[in-house]
């Protein structure tokens, strides 16, 4: 896929990082539980590769905060780290994992990125952004228990969209 197509898709994903959370915020509490900004970042990494995914993971939340105030500035640094890791790792893993089964490759890439992003964000919150006031139980609660509906949505929606884009032959998707 050309760099122009990757740039356009990445820009679309960054725009979705602004628009999707606005839609989810119309339902009280839905954005915190469903994590809609994660969807376009994961897709960008899968479709465009690690560099574009990384940039989308940084630009999406930053632009959303500037334009809408979401996420709030206090949460932005850890969210930038989490989503940057999501975009980077999905792209890297899709290049490295070759089981011979497309769905396995995708799910291995997706789950690895989602775990690594949560670990990096948790470590940064514990040691940099909120030292002394962040615990393992807070991390597990916020990144896994409260957000489990979002995790399920991501594991269903992201592969569905990815394979729909791939099947449509509109784009040549990495893998």
Image (tube, helix red, strand yellow):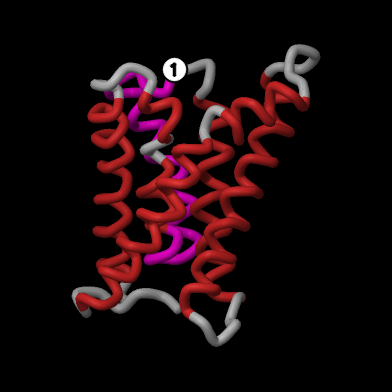
- List the single residue furthest toward the bottom: 100
Q: Which residues are magenta?
A: 45-72
Looking at the image, which residue is at 38% across and 47% down? 39
Left/right of residue 85 with respect to residue 124 in the rendered view: left
Q: Is residue 92 something that shows in the picture?
A: yes
Q: Is residue 52 above or below residue 139?
A: below
Looking at the image, which residue is at 61% across and 45% down? 117
Q: Is residue 35 above or below residue 52?
A: above
Q: Position of residue 138 (x, y in %)?
A: 69, 22
Q: Is residue 153 above or below residue 46?
A: above
Quarter that holds the N terminus: bottom left
Closer to us: 62 or 126: 126
Q: Position of residue 157 (x, y in %)?
A: 35, 54
Whether residue 76 is in magenta: the answer is no
Quarter that holds the C terminus: bottom left
The quarter of the picture where residue 172 lies is bottom left
Predominant secondary structure, magenta span: helix
Looking at the image, which residue is at 25% across and 74% down? 171
Q: Which residue is mark 1?
A: 72
The quarter of the picture where residue 166 lies is bottom left
The quarter of the picture where residue 161 lies is bottom left
Left/right of residue 120 with respect to residue 36 in the rendered view: right
């Amino acid at each position: 896929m050309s760099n122009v197509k990757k740039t356009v898709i990445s820009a679309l994903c960054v725009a979705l990082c602004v628009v999707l959370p606005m839609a989810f915020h119309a339902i009280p509490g839905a954005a915190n539980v469903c994590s809609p900004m994660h969807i376009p970042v994961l897709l960008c990494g899968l479709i465009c590769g690690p560099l574009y995914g990384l940039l989308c993971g940084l630009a999406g939340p930053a632009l959303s905060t500037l334009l809408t105030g979401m996420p709030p500035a206090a949460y932005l640094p850890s969210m930038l780290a989490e989503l940057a890791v999501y975009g980077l790792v999905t792209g890297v893993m899709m290049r490295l994992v070759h089981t011979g089964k497309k769905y396995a490759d995708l799910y291995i890439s997706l789950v690895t990125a989602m775990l690594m992003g949560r670990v990096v964000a948790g470590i940064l919150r514990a040691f940099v952004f909120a030292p002394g006031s962040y615990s393992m139980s807070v991390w597990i609660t916020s990144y896994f228990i409260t957000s489990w509906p979002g995790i399920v949505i991501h594991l269903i929606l992201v592969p569905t969209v990815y394979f729909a884009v791939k099947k449509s032959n509109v784009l040549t998707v990495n893998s």
